[in-house]
Amino acid sequence: MASPGSGFWSFGSEDGSGDPENPGTARAWCQVAQKFTGGIGNKLCALLYGDAEKPAESDGRPSGPSLGKAVWARDQEAPAVAPRGEVNYAVAEASYLLPACNGERPTLAFLQDVMDILLQYVVKSFDRSTKVIDFHYPNELLQEYNWELADQPQNLEEILTNCRTTLKYAIKTGHPRYFNQLSTGLDMVGLAADWLTSTANTNMFTYEIAPVFVLLEYVTLKKMREIIGWSGGSGDGIFSPGGAISNMYAMLIARFKAFPEVKEKGMAAVPRLIAFTSEHSHFSLKKGAAALGIGTDSVILIKCDERGKMIPSDLERRILEAKQKGFVPFLVSATAGTTVYGAFDPLLAIADICKKYNIWMHVDAAWGGGLLVSRKHKWKLSGVERANSVTWNPHKMMGVPLQCSALLVREEGLMQRCNQMHASYLFQQDKHYDLSYDTGDKALQCGRHVDVFKLWLMWRAKGTTGFEAQIDKCLELAEYLYNIIKNREGYEMVFDGKPQHTNVCFWYVPPSLRTLEDNEERMSRLSKVAPVIKARMMEYGTTMVSYQPLGDKVNFFRMVISNPAATHQDIDFLIEEIERLGQDL
Amino acid sequence: MASPGSGFWSFGSEDGSGDPENPGTARAWCQVAQKFTGGIGNKLCALLYGDAEKPAESDGRPSGPSLGKAVWARDQEAPAVAPRGEVNYAVAEASYLLPACNGERPTLAFLQDVMDILLQYVVKSFDRSTKVIDFHYPNELLQEYNWELADQPQNLEEILTNCRTTLKYAIKTGHPRYFNQLSTGLDMVGLAADWLTSTANTNMFTYEIAPVFVLLEYVTLKKMREIIGWSGGSGDGIFSPGGAISNMYAMLIARFKAFPEVKEKGMAAVPRLIAFTSEHSHFSLKKGAAALGIGTDSVILIKCDERGKMIPSDLERRILEAKQKGFVPFLVSATAGTTVYGAFDPLLAIADICKKYNIWMHVDAAWGGGLLVSRKHKWKLSGVERANSVTWNPHKMMGVPLQCSALLVREEGLMQRCNQMHASYLFQQDKHYDLSYDTGDKALQCGRHVDVFKLWLMWRAKGTTGFEAQIDKCLELAEYLYNIIKNREGYEMVFDGKPQHTNVCFWYVPPSLRTLEDNEERMSRLSKVAPVIKARMMEYGTTMVSYQPLGDKVNFFRMVISNPAATHQDIDFLIEEIERLGQDL
């Protein structure tokens, strides 16, 4: 491998000082200025040169160092400014960076150049004139670029190119017209916080190795429990790797609460356990049951009304049925914000039933939890305060970068008892600080990624009122969409009435289908419309919205809005785009 | 809430241009230059001012914008440079940032300022004259700063202060003298890649929403399987949220392979299953068994030799014992690199036993997997190619930022069959691209954090040979430490012989204990030595190394080296520091 020293410092003295009289100074400053986006660099250069010697604009090619940099290297001029222009990336390798001897300056230059690439991407993400996605089929993408891993290192120029290429083909999830997932948007404070989290590079295992983050998790979970309505914010909780795992935790803890012996003896030692959730609930409940050895057959799907809400009378009927068979109902998972319809189960009625039959009540509010911070919308979760556990994903409706999912548990200490293994070689009991802050043993994980900081910092930056404003705005936009399409020609709503969340579910019916009778052939043709429009959206890269079938309903669009960047004009655009792309079908 | 416009742009025209004749220009450039660390800023300023008007040095207080910036705001001077000096953070809020109208410039300024904070932290992390930790007890830390979440937003000045404060109290996990965990170090390319991952802000659910990352996961897992030795790199795998979850996956898949009906019917439908692992194995095996409804009693701990390696004859004996009781042995989890001793179980002998009794062989190489890329050390994992599944955490020995843990599975398709729930509303079957790239349904998670990019980019930047060099270096350092202390007065080795991994386990015996007889009282006093030294290390902040008891051995130090920044001098320092802090005990 190459070693530091040969051709690396391409000019000047190592301490970066130079001759103030050297005319290269303005040029060097200018090279730096060119790094700024939005044309600012050119203005600065004009300023520095008195407009006399305007440097060429960057051609924007994603091919490593700028021409200017290469010229420097040839000319052996002293750089007038900090590290960023100094490194000749074509000969520099990762081994030149910190902790290498003299690695500080190339490191600062390299990280700043990466940052420039990221900042350009951030700015582009919000620019409606850029594509949401530059779509390529998997095989195309595999062939267009060499992604392979080799024995020998690439140089830093190639590494920067890798970064640019990766972002070129990425989805701009912050784009105001990206509506594809429940998690969209790119929050600037959240992003900064995630960068800081990466830089701190620790995990949530113990207070010892993550003192601040452990405390921030404590503060943040308490705040979330207060908002749920548990007295004084008491209880327990954890940030877990996503809503599916949070739901699995709930099932695990509910089982342990009912039969603590299951921890040692396994499922063989307990009666057959039954969980209940609605037919519109998230598939992670069944996935969790499969993993936990409960089995998917023991997850009973309760009927929903036409709006996708669990029908409490059906829940009670199925509980009684299970009990009559000698099975033990141990968990009801109500959903606050279903994935497709955005429906809120009637939590109060469900809480009454859980109380009556002494069953653990879990609320999967992964998607709907954010509405708790909205004074206007939180009534939709009335009864959540009676739950034993709640899944709430700030990475969805609160716009926190991925991943950030919380499981909140009403009873303190239960998680710890459920999951702890007393590994004294990991959790020393004779340490010099209060061990209650060592949270590692209550988790299923050993090391656990720091997911709290971005939520905490965003909360500081927005206040609860800021989250409220952005959530209210998204709901208002959904209502705007609903109001436009509910009576518009060519649209059929999947369910009637104003959406409760930002989910708006509809079919777009192309002109050729509008006069057909409502029979199987029409259904069959209608089912093919959304996939084609979606494929065209991705190929044009103009917008993205999800579609799916559900029950007996053929493929329909599910519009969701969780990106505070979206505006009324973006909703208008979406409608026009669907019509443009679906007109001929 | 405040709205953009009032007092926000504190000076100048919105496009940032200014009068080139204005003497404020040099000063403004200089303010920018001051952002650079390592004294470069001052040199630049001297250059700009011809040394006549040297600006005051920054006082380094973690209290928001510099004095210079405040002066600008008062003087209403036009800024000569890009956004970074422009924003008066004391009146700006997060709502001024993108996607706000005109949010681009304040966003660039804010993110650049965050980046400066991070770059300073990065540089400090490698500076041996800074503390590894500025330790405070939990209650002190809670009281010293207000961490609470409020209804109203803080301004961006306060947000920057929050960032500085968080880092002030954080552990410098990249510090060359931080030896506390199996994951240490801060790789510059890995860090850059993690920043990019945050910026791309997507998850691994489908090719649709993570085209590049899904392909990179495919490429990287294949490479890892090739290195394990599975023919042509065939098989399956996933990046999971940590080694504990990877081990749980292995257990889950092994169970499904033996009894696929468990997915629907649960553990009630299958005979009693027994897993085997060594008494030195990681506690996650028991944790996984508890979660999966198998029960911790069904995890049999096999005896180890004095070096911490599983004894194959004891494994076979316990397998036969279980079978005689009518139980079904379904999993042997061998460890390649135990947590405390760094021991490698004899994989070939274990593979023979697994083959003989038709049991799934898992290798937990979370810690030791990295040695596979070292031509010098990979023999320690001989037999890993016969495993059915392997846990390998690049965030440990390969120095990839947290988290990055892979589970590799030899049989393709099994993970998918084990975990898939066929949720057609999430995994549409009529999409326009090759659906085999939609990996979401083989995971326990729904959304899954992008953990692959940092490993992939580091691999491109180092090549396999670069990883090899840094791993060989860490092992060489461990041997250096071992050679120094094995015969040094005041040290006793916990086990004899050269360490196989970088784990060096030893007692430091203070002078007052050296002449005592080897009895209970001495053991009791010795057990208190490491905790006191460790507490002192943290209070001084000079270094950190882990200690623990294990079996009948009282608290001893477990030194591990996974940080390529560590040098021989750091090892020397550790020894001196232990002696300095433990001398009087």
Image: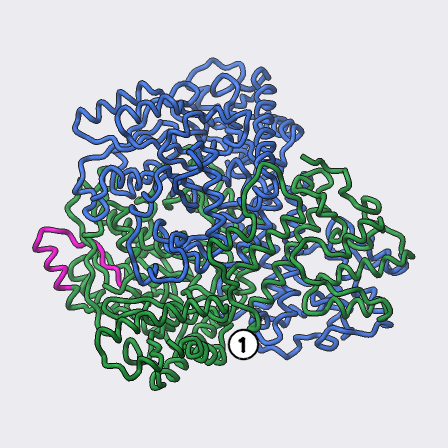
Chain colours: A green, B blue
Foreground of the two, A108 or B119: A108
Which quarter of the image is occupied by the C terminus of chain B?
A: top right
Residue A237 visible in image = no
Q: Residue at x 37, y 82 (%)?
A: A485
User: Can residue A376 be seen?
Assistant: yes
Quarter of the image that includes the N terminus of chain B: bottom right
User: According to the image, label 1 marks what residue?
Assistant: B1
Nearer to me, B536 or A271: A271
Q: Is residue B123 left or right of residue A232?
A: right
Task: Tell me which amino acid carries mark 1.
Answer: Met
Q: Chain of mark 1?
A: B
Say above or below: B301 vs B43: above
Please rate how many residues cluster around mark 1, counting C-alpha atoms within 10 Å: few if below 14, some from 14 to 19, many from 20: few
What is the x, y in percent for residue B8?
A: 66, 75
Residue furthest toward the right? A21
For this orientation, the residue located farthest to the left is A324
Tell me which residue sits at (77%, 57%) in the image: A68
Q: Front-most of A161 and A396?
A: A161
Give coordinates of residue B7: x percent, y percent.
Answer: 66, 77
Residue B580 pos. (x, y %): 62, 28
User: Start and end of the magenta stretch?
Assistant: A316-334
Magenta stretch holds residue B291:
no
Q: Residue at x 40, y 71 (%)?
A: A533
Q: How many marks?
A: 1
Where residue A433 appears, x then y in whole percent? 48, 42
Give the image quarter of residue A67.
bottom right
Query: Which secondary structure lies at badge 1?
Result: loop
From the viewer's perspective, is residue B525 above or below residue A160?
A: above
- Left or right of residue A14: residue A142: left
Q: Magenta segment: does it hold A319?
A: yes
Is B476 on the left-hand or right-hand side of B30?
Answer: left
